């Protein structure tokens, strides 16, 4: 059975089975807000899903959409959830096709009047199946620059989920940032084989610390727990972990889903279709990713060099290499 979450103070149940919650819209913003459904394979507390969820909640609060969602949807139930929301009248369905690339595209083909926007390692399909990648590699590169100036051992750990292109690119971006200021760096890479298993990520982080790492890059929730436990520093990804680990996480490679969402909303409302790649809206120049860091925890000279490179990226004068190869 699909799980639903409560969002906002103005939610109400939607759907024949009571699946999902919707935020009613302030009519001053839109006479007929777009009906958007989010399907999350993990709990919305999971870092990646939290970014989608937060953007859609904010869009609902802004009056741009009505938002319903389901969380913790397994791969075996995912296509069914897509069909249910399409049947219930969702105009735009947002989610993740990584585990159901073929099945998700088949659902989209069966509902040509419903627009889909899916995190995916594949290409857009038809006029209504759009894709996006999680490209916060630029923020990861900048965090790596800071880390490279802070490590005493010169050994850096990174814990990822599964070696899919987006995860590989993120870790490779971090490594490139480290190497740009610490050419002799040694990197330890670990994948936990799932997108949400904090205890497993913690164990992977502890193993890297035991192998000499004194800074961890946490692509997965749980990595910072290992760093905190052993008294070393860590970097977060996607969301701001410094708020949760103020003495441990000194920087975060942030990802902002709102630019992607806004573009898909505009295309849906204009009846342009969503059958395109929305990944470019993840770039730093579009406001899709950036670095957030605790300046008090980072050497001033490291900050100065990082900020210079950050400005160059935003100005289009420096490009962080996109490397999809599996890091080893």
Image (spheres, helix red, strand yellow):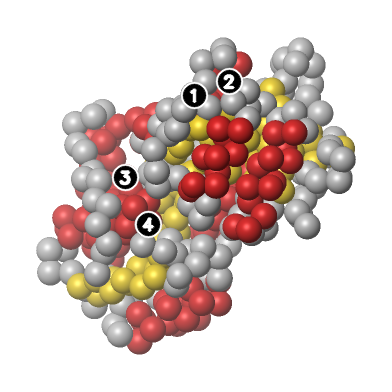
Residue 187 in the image: state x and y as whole percent: 24, 71
The secondary structure type at the circle numbered 1 is: loop
Label 3: how many Cα within 10 Å (few below 14, some 14–19, many 20+): many
Cα–Cα span, label 1 and label 2 = 11 Å
Tally of marks: 4
Q: Residue 138 carries which label?
A: 3
Residue 68 sits above or below residue 267 on the image: below
Residue 288 in the image: state x and y as whole percent: 43, 36
Q: Residue 127 carries which label?
A: 1
Cα–Cα span, label 3 and label 1 = 30 Å
Residue 227 sits above or below residue 126 on the image: below
The secondary structure type at the circle numbered 2 is: helix
Q: Which mark is residue 164?
A: 4
- Report which residue position mark 2 lands on: 268
Residue appearing at x 26%, y 36% in the figure: 313
Between discs 1 and 4, the one toward the N terminus: 1
């Amino acid at each position: 059975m699909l799980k639903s979450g409560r969002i906002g103070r103005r939610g109400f149940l939607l759907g024949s089975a009571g699946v999902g919650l919707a935020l009613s819209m302030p009519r001053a913003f839109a006479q007929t807000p777009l009906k958007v459904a989010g399907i999350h394979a993990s709990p919305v507390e999971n870092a990646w899903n939290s970014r989608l969820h937060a953007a859609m909640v904010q869009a609902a609060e802004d009056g741009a959409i009505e938002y319903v969602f389901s969380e913790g949807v397994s791969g075996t139930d995912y296509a069914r959830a897509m069909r249910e929301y399409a049947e219930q009248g969702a105009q735009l369905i947002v989610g993740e096709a990584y585990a159901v690339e073929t099945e998700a595209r088949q659902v989209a083909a069966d509902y040509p009047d419903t627009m889909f926007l899916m995190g995916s390692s594949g290409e857009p399909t038809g006029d209504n199946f759009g894709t996006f990648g999680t490209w916060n590699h630029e923020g990861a590169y900048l965090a790596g620059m800071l880390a490279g100036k802070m490590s005493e051992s010169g050994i850096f750990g990174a814990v990822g989920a599964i070696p899919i292109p987006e995860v590989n690119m993120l870790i490779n971006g971090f490594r490139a940032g480290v190497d740009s200021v610490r050419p002799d760096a040694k990197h330890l890479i670990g994948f936990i084989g799932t997108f949400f298993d904090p205890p497993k990520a913690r164990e992977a982080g502890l193993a890297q610390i035991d192998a000499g790492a004194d800074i961890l890059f946490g692509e997965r929730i749980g990595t910072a727990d290992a760093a905190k436990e052993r008294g070393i520093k860590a970097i977060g990804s996607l969301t701001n972990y410094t708020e949760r680990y103020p003495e441990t996480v000194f920087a975060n490679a942030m990802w902002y889903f709102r630019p992607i969402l806004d573009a898909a909303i505009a295309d849906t409302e204009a009846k342009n279709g969503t059958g395109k790649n929305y990944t470019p809206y993840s770039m730093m120049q579009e406001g899709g990713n950036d670095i957030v860091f605790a300046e008090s925890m980072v050497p001033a000279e490291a900050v100065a060099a990082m900020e210079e490179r950050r400005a160059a990226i935003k100005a289009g004068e420096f490009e962080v290499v996109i490397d999809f190869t599996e890091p080893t």
